[in-house]
Image: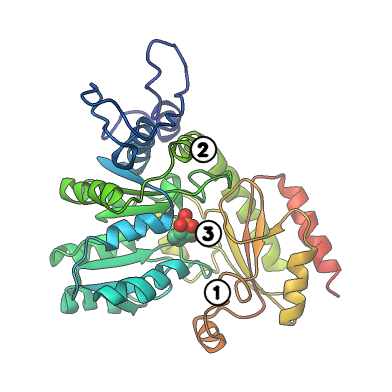
Amino acid sequence: MKNKSPSGFQTRAVHEGRGFGGTTGAVMPPVFMTSTFATGNPDGFDYTRSGNPNFRLLESSAASLEGARFATCFASGVSAITAVVSTLQSGDLVLAEENVYGCTYRLFEKVFAKFGVEVRYSDFTQPSNWEQIKRLRPALVWIESPTNPLLKIVDIAGISWVAATVGVPVVVDNTFASPYLQRPLELGATLSLSSTTKYVNGHSDCLGGIVATNDAVWHNKMVFAQKALGLQPSPFDAWLTTRGQRTLALRMERHCANALALARWLEKRKGVRWVRYPFLPSHPQYKLARRQMKAGSGIVTAELACSAKSALAFCRRLKLFTLAESLGGVESLVCHPATMTHASVPPVVRRKVGIGDRLIRLSVGTEDVADLLRDLDEAFAGLS
Ligand SMILES: *Cc1c(COP(=O)(O)O)cnc(C)c1O
C-alpha cells in the first residue's frame, strides 16, 4: 500500500483501486464473485471472508485518500464500529462524544455493555472536558465531527494531542466530512472510521465501512476482526464503493456549494428559526470548522417556526428532497429527526440536546441549486 503519494487527491481517486485485470487490458477491475481461492495462488488469497481482490483494491484506494498506510473494509459503518470495539476487553472504558451517531450509541449500550465495556459521554466541544481523558485514561476516545444532526464540530487535533500525552488511541467517525474535506489521521487521530454508505460511495446503492490507520498493530487488529467476526462486505459492494470513490472530490465540491447556498438562503427565509451549517459564520464552532475542514459538507439542519405537524408536512411537500433516512448520495433527502432517526430517544432527552420537533435535516444533493431552492420555496409557500 502506498503512502504520501505525490499526486493530488482527485488524481489518486481516479487512479488508485485499479488492477487485477490480468492480461485482458481491462481499464476497470472485474468483480470477483468467488467465496474461495485455489491454495498457493501467488496473490495469497484463500477465502473471501479474509480477503478478496475487490477488497484489496478498495482498501488501497481508501488508504490513499485518507492519507493512511492501511485501510480495512467492512460490510457497513456499523460493522466497522463493531470491529473497533471488539478489540476491547471487559472492564475497558470508552470516553465518547455525547452526540455520537444513534447506532453507535445503541451498539455501546445494548450490545457491548453486556460484555463489560463501559462508555461515558462528554461534550467534547468544551476543551475543559478534555482533561477527563487524562484523569480517566480510557481504552479509547470516540469522537465524531460534524455530528448528527446538530453538526457540532469537535477539535480533532486538540483532543488527539491531549490523548497522545497519556497514550490513549483516538477514533474519529469521519462519515459526515469524508476524507476529501477532513483527514483525521493527519490531525493526529489513531483511527479514521467511515460509513462509506454515505459520501464515499455516494450513490445510495450499497452499504460499507472503512477503518484507516497508520498503526500496524491496529491494522492487524482490523484485519483479524474482518475475518474472525465475519464483517467483510460482498465483493460487488466493494467494487461499487471503489467506483463511487473515484468521483468523491467532484461530488463533494457540488454538495458543499449547494449546501452553503441553501444554508444562506434559509438563514434569511421567513419561517425559519435558525440554521446550522459548519461554514456559516453563525455556527458556534465556525472558526474551528474553517480550520479543520476544507468545506462545510452537504448537510444543513434547520428549525422551522411552525408546529411539529407542519414541519413534517413541510418535509412531505418537498418534491426533489425525498423523505428518507441516510445521507450523502447525489440525490437530495430530507429527514425529520424527531420522528425518524431519533424517534427512539425520549422526547425530554431530545429537547435537552436540542433536537426539537420542528427540526429538519437536509442532505443536499448534487442537483441544480436553483431547482432545490425553488422546491424549498414552494414547500414554504404551502405552509401558510
Ligand atoms: C450511517 C452512519 C453510520 C453507520 O453506517 P452504516 O453504513 O449505516 O452501518 C455510522 N456513523 C455515522 C456518522 C453515520 O452517519
| Element under disc 1 | loop
Which numbered circle lies on residue 279? Answer: 3
| Element under disc 2 | helix
Q: Nearer the viewer, mark 2 or mark 3?
A: 2
Q: Earlier in the sequence, mark 3 or mark 1?
A: 3
- Most foreground residue, 85 or 316: 85
Among the 4 quarters of the image, the one containing residue 325? bottom right
Whether label 2 lies within 8 Å of ligand 1 gets the answer: no
| Element under disc 3 | loop
- Most foreground residue, 2 or 233: 233
For the residues labelled 3 and 1, the Cα–Cα distance comes to 25 Å
Among the 4 quarters of the image, the one containing residue 273? bottom right
For the residues labelled 1 and 2, the Cα–Cα distance comes to 28 Å
The type of residue carrying mark 1 is His
For the residues labelled 2 and 3, the Cα–Cα distance comes to 25 Å
- Number of numbered callouts drawn: 3
- How packed mark 1 is, by other alpha carbons closer than 10 Å (few <14, some 14-19, many 20 or more), is some
Which numbered circle lies on residue 342? Answer: 1
